[in-house]
Amino acid sequence: MEKRISGTTGLFTLLGSPVGHSGSPAMYNFSFQKQGLDYAYLAFDVKKEQMPQAIDALRLFKVRGSNVTMPCKSIAATLVDDLSPAAKIIGAINVIVNDNGKLTGHITDGIGFVRNLKETGVDIKGKKLVVLGAGGAATALQVQCALDGAKEISIFNQDDEFYQNAEKTKEKIGQAKPEVKVNVYPLADQAKLKAEIAQADILVNATIVGMKPLDGQSLVDKSYLRSDLVVADTVYNPLKTKLIEDAETLGCTIAPGKGMLLWQGAAAYSLFTGKEMPTAEYQAYEQ
Ligand code: NAD
């Protein structure tokens, strides 16, 4: 490390709270070193109300780029100079690129989701999706799938504060990509859920159900699944949720959340450095 850090080393950061558990510093610093890049990546615990100061600090210290995590993704989108097309629609960012003082916000969660599917041999183009959830991860992947050519997206959510979000996403996709059909249904309508899954190519869980401490739970009855359905999850802790395990037992193609996490990070790395992240080497190193 003492040989790697010099007076010219460019800084990348992670902003959000909490950040102590994040795997990003290890992943990006490993990749910088592997590719001989004179960069370093550090995490800073920043609360939502401190984001204006943090963004000023990025400018002051000429930080090359930053990731943004919860709970700062939405406020950060209001503080940068420009937004990517997906970030504009979603109104949240997880990446900031500092291009000689101009800060551009991007959102790579949806890009990571689509790439994760691609890695399992599934092309999103022309597909019908059923997505459970209407929070941050759900919205990001719904918008990206629409931008990348999905045919139809049926969103199911429980009756909570996120339900309205689904209606807003429907409206926004309708404006940006009117050819994509978006339906919003209450999760309580199990007959509808069963019928929609029966007609879908891809089923996605983008809720917190399945994540610790809700591990062992699934929102989808196993009998709704069939072997030619692609089943994806955004949850990465545990590595395999009950939904993913049920799907795997039935022989479905599966795309667990860990892959989405890796590929959203890799997409950010490309925005930061203009290079492909050495993902295979990092995965081998991590194990
Ligand atoms: P969020 O808080 O923004 O949204 C939560 C969603 O879960 C909402 O749709 C809410 O209605 C739903 N929900 C909550 N409790 C529920 C219940 N008991 N029954 C049914 N639905 C319920 O959360 P988020 O940031 O979108 O994260 C969702 C999951 O995605 C988390 O597990 C998170 O770790 C994961 N995630 C993964 C990645 C990745 O790269 N793999 C990226 C972002 C988030």
Image: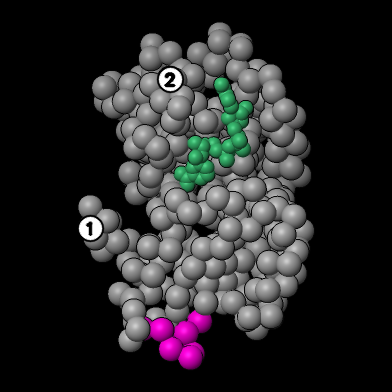
* Residue 3 image offset from top left, x and y in percent: 33, 86
150 relative to 22 in the view: left or right: right
117 relative to 44 in the view: left or right: left
Task: State which quadrant residue 68 falls in.
Answer: bottom right
Per the rendered image, the range of residues in magenta is 4-10
Q: Amino acid at mark 1?
A: Ala
- Queried on whether the Cβ of the residue with tag 2 lies below 8 angstroms from ligand 1, the answer reads yes
Q: Which residue is mark 2?
A: 217
Q: Which residue is mark 1?
A: 284
User: Which quadrant of the figure shows ligand 1?
Assistant: top right
Say whether residue 9 is visible: yes
Say whether residue 85 is visible: no
Between residue 48 and residue 234, name the one nearer to us: 48
Helix, strand or loop at label 1? It is helix
Between residue 234 and residue 10, name the one nearer to us: 10
Label 1 CA crowd tier, 10 Å (few <14, some 14–19, many 20+): few
